[in-house]
Image: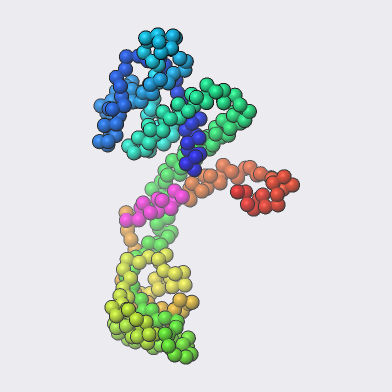
Amino acid sequence: MRHLWIFCLFVITLAWVQTKPAGPRLPPAANLERSHDQGGNSDRVAPDAAVLTIKGLCSAPPPGGKDSGKSPCETVVTRAQFEKLVNAIQPDADSASRRQIAQAYPQFLIMAHEAQQRGLDHQPGFEERLAFARLQILSQVLTRQIQQEAAQVPDKDIDNWYQSHTKDFEQANLERLIVPNTRQQGDNVEESMSREATMLRTRAAAGEDFTKLQKEAYEFAGVAGNNQPDPNMLDMHRRGLPPAHAAAFDLKPGEVSQVISDATGHYVYKMDSKEIQPLQDVHQEISNTLRRQRLKEMMEAVQRAFTTEMNRAYFGTKAKEDPD
């Protein structure tokens, strides 16, 4: 991905930059360095002020060369030009990203200039690579636009989602008792652990303390290092439990579940309290969910009208299954 970004920046550089003979400009390099070191303050820099100056780089050597006594040529990039480039590449670039672009951009200009001097832009395949880069850039621009459109989620849709997915926003304080499937020592362990889980569940339903019961479960299983177990599960959501355990959220406050057994052990839950989070607390979460759905649907809508057939005689039998 990093090489693709570099290549796209290189293509944009070739198409955008204009070199010009040197004029009476203030050297900007030191000012740019200090500005970025201090976090940057672009408001103090005029739009037509130079922010990058590449001395010695111009479209053609100055008449008479170095011995003519004239000022050497240079390429100047103003603040307006640089920001236009940054906004095209990375509109949300922070100061660190802008500094990286500022450091890389002159290198691309110099390398592109040398490549043109060598006639590499006329080599076979160059136009095809340029056209392919154009496709990539257009695809990225479209994707960015669709992402922006998908992010515009109406409040009505958020409210409707909240009303129809109330269970997703239940928040509960639970207690959980874990009885391992196995014991460190002894025979017929599966049957004995199952019996122990049933007995402890009965005592839990009768109101015994879960911490005390958990200690006994660990002692019975021969588990060491859990002298102070904490059975409390605070601010839990239904999706935070394994799917087979989600029924614990259907308990009423004070109720204790039946024993839930799976490959990892035997579990007993107690519902201490439960509430539905208010819409304002989950507004952003719902917005993000709907944004992802809208993005997926919009991207699929673009692709839906088209199909691609690959010649397996050319690409091989795994072409469709493994396009990489």
Query: Which residue appears farthest toward the right when viewing the image?
Result: 313
On screen, residue 23 above or below 310: above
Residue 302: percent from left, percent from top: 56, 42
On screen, residue 236 above or below 203: above
Observer able to see residue 202: no
Residue placed at 57% from the left, 23% from the top? Answer: 119
**Magenta stretch, residue numbers:** 281-292
Quadrant housing residue 38: top left
Horizontal arrangement in the rendering, residue 243 relative to residue 216 (left or right): right
Residue 220: percent from left, percent from top: 37, 87
Residue 274: percent from left, percent from top: 33, 69
Give the camera-side residue of 150 and 80.
Answer: 80
The prevailing secondary structure element of the residues shown in magenta is helix
On screen, residue 206 above or below 126: below
Is 178 included in the stretch rendered in magenta?
no
On screen, residue 58 above or below 31: above
Residue placed at 42% from the left, 60% from the top? Answer: 165
Q: How is the image coloured?
A: rainbow
Give the camera-side residue of 265 and 292.
Answer: 265
